[in-house]
Image (spheres, grey):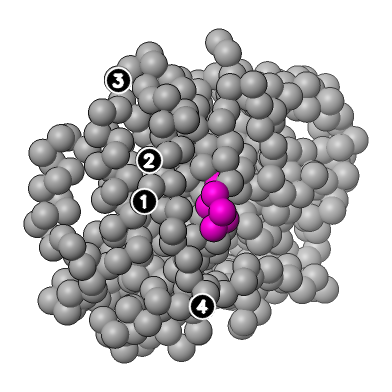
């Protein structure tokens, strides 16, 4: 297959800072959008934690030109989809329609992100739904272990210290006026990315975007927030949450990993696959679940992110097995940082990553999401065509060094939720 590259991706930067990428694919008569705006919970005050998430959720509830019914009728009438969701540093957009309906889809996207109305009745309902969800999560051991881990690993003031959806205390105070004020001061074109993939001429697609977004400027939009990584952990830390009546305990342990832009992120991905992803969840799955019989699930993950997200090992266990499981999870972290992986492990995981890549490119959605991430994390337009060579250039020493750089078995942060 022909991979997207600088030879077939159209990339245009509008005068107001919006980056538009278009990849023509006429295999199906549809078009997919994947994009993001430079706004998220990092741009809110801790006292209003959850404001960015609630704002993004409210965008589709009504605009100055269309009410809730008109927005969703416009989509349903042509079988199209459009969505907006908030994160820590970005607010993501996605959409899908027949190629002939791209102008309508872009027009609707522009309407909801530029001119939302924040109708009181819908904001009240969204707030109530969020509070209900937070109450349910407060009794979920898996969620609470994760929050205990993040709260301990990242200090107050760091965006990752706070949940994107807020807390029961902060969300309760948020009003429609708060959402409108946040949108007015935080939303803007600068830093926005919009990827279009499908049966559309690239030049036409760019002009459609320019017509609806080219004049968008917000002089109040804040500059990009660059957050320092969490302080280095000098000793192991543990945070335990007790939830009486539960029958399962959940464990999250690890440390701060690389950012997605870091040169060593691919090596970290490969190391993480060996640790707790490949096959039946890698070494962690084999040790903790298969051989030890201690866990309902056990795996590891390294997500990168705009700022450095954690490199973490996660397991759900019988409460009686918490310490035993932590011991085995820690042993596998130590092994990864002390012993080079085998040649077979290296070859198997390199083959997995390079073999999986074409599968991501089988759909317009997969292509659009991949191109968006390439742009967001500065990978360049030829990242995909160079990917195989890059992965196969990694050595056992690269894997060992990246594990040592980010993981220390004697200085792990541990979050536990248990009865």
Which residue is the site of mark 4?
Answer: 220
Quadrant location of the C terminus? bottom left
The mark lying in front, picked from 4 and 3, is 4
Query: From mark 4 to mark 3, how far is it between C-alphas?
Result: 40 Å
Q: Residue at x 23, y 71 (%)?
A: 117
> Reading the chain from its start, which is encountered first: label 2 or label 3?
3
Which residue is the site of mark 2?
Answer: 208
Q: Residue at x 50, y 84 (%)?
A: 45
In the displayed image of the protein, which residue is found farthest to the right?
397
Closer to us: 345 or 165: 165
Which residue is the site of mark 1?
Answer: 212
Above or below: residue 170 compared with residue 299: below
* Mark 1 crowdedness (10 Å alpha carbons): few <14, some 14-19, many ≥20: some
Badge 1 marks a residue whose secondary structure is helix
- In percent of width and height, residue 51 lies at 39, 77
> Reading the chain from its start, which is encountered first: label 4 or label 1?
1
Badge 2 marks a residue whose secondary structure is helix
Closer to us: 254 or 90: 90
Closer to us: 173 or 284: 173
Specify start and end residues of the magenta stretch as a single range.
Answer: 14-19
* Mark 4 crowdedness (10 Å alpha carbons): few <14, some 14-19, many ≥20: few
Residue 22 appears in the rendering: yes
Query: From mark 1 to mark 2, how far is it between C-alphas?
Result: 7 Å
- In percent of width and height, residue 149 lies at 58, 68
The mark lying in front, picked from 2 and 3, is 2
The mark lying in front, picked from 4 and 1, is 1
């Amino acid at each position: 297959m022909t991979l997207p590259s600088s030879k077939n991706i159209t990339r245009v930067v509008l005068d107001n800072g919006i980056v538009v990428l278009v990849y023509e694919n006429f295999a199906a008569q549809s078009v997919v959008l994947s994009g993001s705006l430079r706004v998220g919970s990092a741009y809110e005050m801790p006292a209003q934690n959850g404001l960015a998430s609630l704002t993004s959720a409210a965008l589709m509830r009504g605009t100055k030109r269309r009410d809730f019914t008109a927005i969703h009728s416009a989509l349903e009438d042509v079988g199209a989809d459009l969505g907006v969701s908030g994160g820590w540093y970005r607010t993501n957009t996605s959409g899908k329609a027949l190629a002939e309906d791209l102008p309508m889809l872009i027009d609707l996207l522009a309407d909801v992100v530029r001119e939302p109305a924040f109708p009181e009745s819908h904001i009240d309902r969204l707030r109530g739904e969020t509070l209900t969800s937070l109450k349910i999560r407060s009794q979920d051991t898996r969620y609470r272990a994760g929050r205990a881990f993040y709260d301990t690993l990242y200090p107050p003031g760091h965006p990752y210290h706070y949940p994107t959806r807020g807390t029961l205390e902060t969300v309760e105070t948020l009003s429609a006026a708060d959402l409108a004020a946040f949108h007015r001061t935080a939303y803007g074109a600068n830093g926005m990315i919009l990827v279009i993939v499908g049966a559309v001429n690239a030049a036409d697609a760019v002009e459609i975007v320019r017509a609806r977004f080219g004049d968008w400027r917000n002089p109040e939009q804040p500059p990009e927030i660059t957050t320092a990584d969490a302080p280095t952990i000098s000793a192991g830390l543990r945070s335990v949450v007790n939830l009486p009546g539960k029958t399962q305990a959940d464990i999250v342990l690890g440390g701060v990993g690389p950012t997605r832009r870091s040169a060593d992120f691919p090596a970290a991905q490969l190391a993480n696959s060996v640790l707790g992803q490949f096959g039946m969840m890698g070494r962690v799955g084999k040790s903790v679940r298969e051989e030890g019989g201690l866990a309902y699930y056990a795996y590891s993950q390294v997500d990168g992110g705009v700022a450095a997200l954690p490199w973490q090992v996660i397991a759900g266990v019988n409460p009686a097995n918490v310490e035993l499981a932590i011991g085995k999870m820690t042993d596998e972290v130590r092994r990864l940082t002390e012993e080079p992986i085998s040649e077979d492990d290296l070859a198997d995981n390199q083959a997995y990553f390079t073999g999986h890549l074409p599968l991501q490119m089988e759909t317009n959605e997969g292509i659009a999401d991949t191109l968006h991430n390439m742009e967001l994390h500065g990978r360049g337009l030829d990242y995909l065509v160079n990917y195989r060579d890059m992965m196969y250039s990694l050595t056992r020493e690269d894997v060992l060094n990246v594990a040592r750089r980010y993981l220390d078995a004697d200085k792990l942060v541990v979050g536990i939720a248990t009865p």
